[in-house]
Amino acid sequence: MPSVFIKTYGCQMNERDSGAVAAQLQARGFTLAESEKGADVVLLNTCSVRDAAEQKAIGKMQNISASLRKENPKVILGFMGCMAQSRGEQLLKQLPAIDLVVGTQKFHRTADYLQEIATGGRRKIVDVSEEAGSQSEIRDHPVSPGSQPGTVTAFVSIMQGCNQHCTFCIVPFTRGEERSRTIEEIVLECRQLVGRGVREITLLGQIVTSFGRRDIPVRDTRSAFVQLLDAIHEIEGLQRIRFTSPHPKGYGDDLVDAYGRLPKLCESAHIPLQSGSNQLLKRMHRGYTRERFLALVEKLRLARPGIGLTTDIIVGFPGETAEDFEQTLSLADEARFDNAYIFKYSQRKDTPAASMPDQVPLEIREERNATLLQRINSIAAEKYQNFVGQTVEILVEGPSKKNTARFMGRTRCNKIVLFDGSSRHLGQLMNLKIERTGSFTLYGDPAIINLS
Ligand code: SAM
């Protein structure tokens, strides 16, 4: 049987797209390889959000093509996803060793294209065109052996594209216009996953809160996204629901209310802030102010006390002054996030911010990144410390990635907990007492495990 190795860069949406391609290839008789060594096909699913991610994927492909082609001249090499979409044909010129370039609306064509190349029908294929209905093609999940992590939790893609046009972001160019699946299709996929043992589902999209905005009318003051949450909540056997990534503007009262109403909706929310300065938020085209953002944080904490809140922040956006950055630091102090993904601003092709004046020098971006990281980490450390001595409910996902002698679960507010478990705990909800903390990790004492 031919084997394929798929390496994924970037966000959970990319993970999910790779999963759908893996399932498609399994159905055509491929086995999934653990590394590129000895694989018949190597596919890199790429990210374009920052330049560093693109350079990493290009470097990896250069290394792979130099070493693998010598061992196996027939190995097929391809790029998929965001960078494939934005660079297209140009990638073949830059890296003549590659055979395939598959854009973000064409993942479902990968198996056909590989077959065409393998049988000599075509030597090289580049397909980055748009395809109506492609959002409904990201639905199959690869089959993983029995107790592998990934069988208990699953990602479900509910839409593709983004219409926000934040001035820093390349996503609307790489992922196209927002297109949503139907509620029925999504519920069917979730039911099938639950039938396979999945207990927790994370709904995915670039801006999930915009789900179905154009196609599904508001009903009883509930937006399409909240109607979807309601429908998924009905699925018997499903224990937990999460979603990412939303937009702060998308947290209407109906969604805040859903946190109070739907017990399966975990008390955890990722709310991308980007900056604490109103002046910058305006230039980023974010559509909210720091005051509105902080009011939302308060509303969510009222609706679900103890809710875990995480965010994305960009440092060094063009024109960011020391005062603007101070505003971000002060917002971080007020909001007290459980964690934050901090990004140094990266100039992206064709985005309005790339040609804005006053680009911030790299040393300043690095300095601000370090300062903010330190602030976020010290707040998070205090919050993690507060868990010591508390009993938390975890869903056991599988062996820990770093130390397979330990097992890993997640609290409802999305904190990782490690404990000395075994495969019999897989997929179980357990109450566990927290004994100590590490960096963004909680440790539970196995002696006090309490099966629920
Ligand atoms: N839903 C998210 C939102 O509300 O903006 C978008 C997800 S985006 C793909 C992931 C994160 O990447 C963004 O939240 C932003 O912090 C970061 N990002 C996007 N473009 C960037 C750029 N040009 N430079 C640095 N970070 C960037």
Image (spheres, helix red, strand yellow):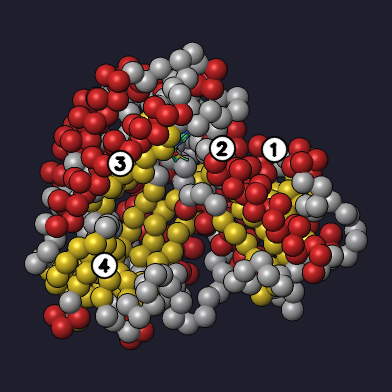
Q: Which residue is mark 3?
A: 373
- Left or right of 412 on screen, residue 363: right
Q: Which residue is mark 1?
A: 87
Q: In the depicted view, which residue is nearer to us: 131 or 166? A: 166
- Left or right of 322 on screen, residue 22: right
Circles 4, 3 touching at the beta carbon (< 8 Å)? no
Q: Earlier in the sequence, mark 4 or mark 1?
A: 1
CA distance separating discs 4 and 3: 22 Å
- Front label number (2 vs 4): 2
Could you tell me the amino acid type at mark 2? Asp
Circles 4, 1 touching at the beta carbon (< 8 Å)? no
Q: In the depicted view, which residue is nearer to us: 427 or 399? A: 399
Q: Which residue is mark 4?
A: 417
Residue at the image position 62 percent from the left and 49 percent from the top: 57
Residue at the image position 13 percent from the left and 43 percent from the top: 302
Circles 1, 2 touching at the beta carbon (< 8 Å)? no
Q: Earlier in the sequence, mark 1 or mark 3?
A: 1
Could you tell me the amino acid type at mark 1? Arg
Q: Earlier in the sequence, mark 4 or mark 3?
A: 3
CA distance separating discs 1 and 2: 12 Å
- Front label number (4 vs 3): 3
Question: The residue tagged with tag 3: helix, strand or loop?
Answer: helix
Q: Which corner quadrant holds the N terminus?
A: bottom right
Q: Which residue is mark 2?
A: 51
Residue at the image position 55 percent from the left and 74 percent from the top: 143
